[in-house]
Image (cartoon, rainbow, N blue to C red):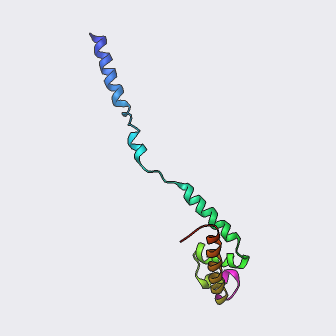
């Protein structure tokens, strides 16, 4: 009787010490973030930026990607603010055409 009692107690304690296993079925229903689309989008943008001239690419990187104002970008690039504005304008126009050639639509 004592042996049986201790077996039951041990079994009860072992279930309390280890958490119950969860059924993986509900986890399979949760949507997972798909990073492939994001990676392809970044690769396409990177390729399109490579088509731009060095001056236009630098102006876009300073203003759009680094978040600098036109004045800050002008200081970093060592050119007048008006030049930065015109380079950004023409760079965006060229970038749009380059992305359209790659099949990207807005």
Q: Which residues are magenta?
A: 75-81
Residue 54 seen by the camera: yes
Q: Nearer the viewer, residue 60 or 62?
A: 60
Q: Is residue 78 magenta?
A: yes
Q: Residue furthest right?
A: 54
Q: Quadrant of residue 69?
A: bottom right
Residue 20: x and y in percent read: 36, 33
Q: In this rendering, would 24 be left or right of 68?
A: left
Residue 5: x and y in percent read: 28, 15
Q: Quadrant of residue 23?
A: top left
Against 77, is 44 above or below? above
Q: Nearer the viewer, residue 77 or 4?
A: 77
At 32% across and 16% down in the image, what residue appears?
7
Q: Is residue 103 magenta?
A: no
At 64% across and 88% down in the image, what residue appears?
81
Residue 11: x and y in percent read: 33, 22
Residue 66 seen by the camera: no
Q: Nearer the viewer, residue 17 or 50?
A: 50
């Amino acid at each position: 009787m004592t042996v049986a009692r201790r077996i039951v107690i041990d079994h009860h304690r072992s279930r309390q010490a280890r958490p119950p296993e969860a059924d993986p079925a509900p986890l399979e229903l949760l949507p997972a973030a798909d990073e492939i689309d994001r990676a392809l989008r970044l690769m396409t943008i990177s390729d399109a930026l490579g088509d731009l001239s060095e001056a236009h690419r630098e102006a876009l990187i300073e203003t759009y990607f680094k978040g600098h104002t036109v004045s800050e970008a002008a200081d970093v690039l060592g050119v007048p603010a008006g030049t930065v504005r015109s380079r950004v304008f023409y760079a965006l126009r060229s970038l749009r055409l380059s992305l359209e050639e790659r099949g990207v639509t807005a």
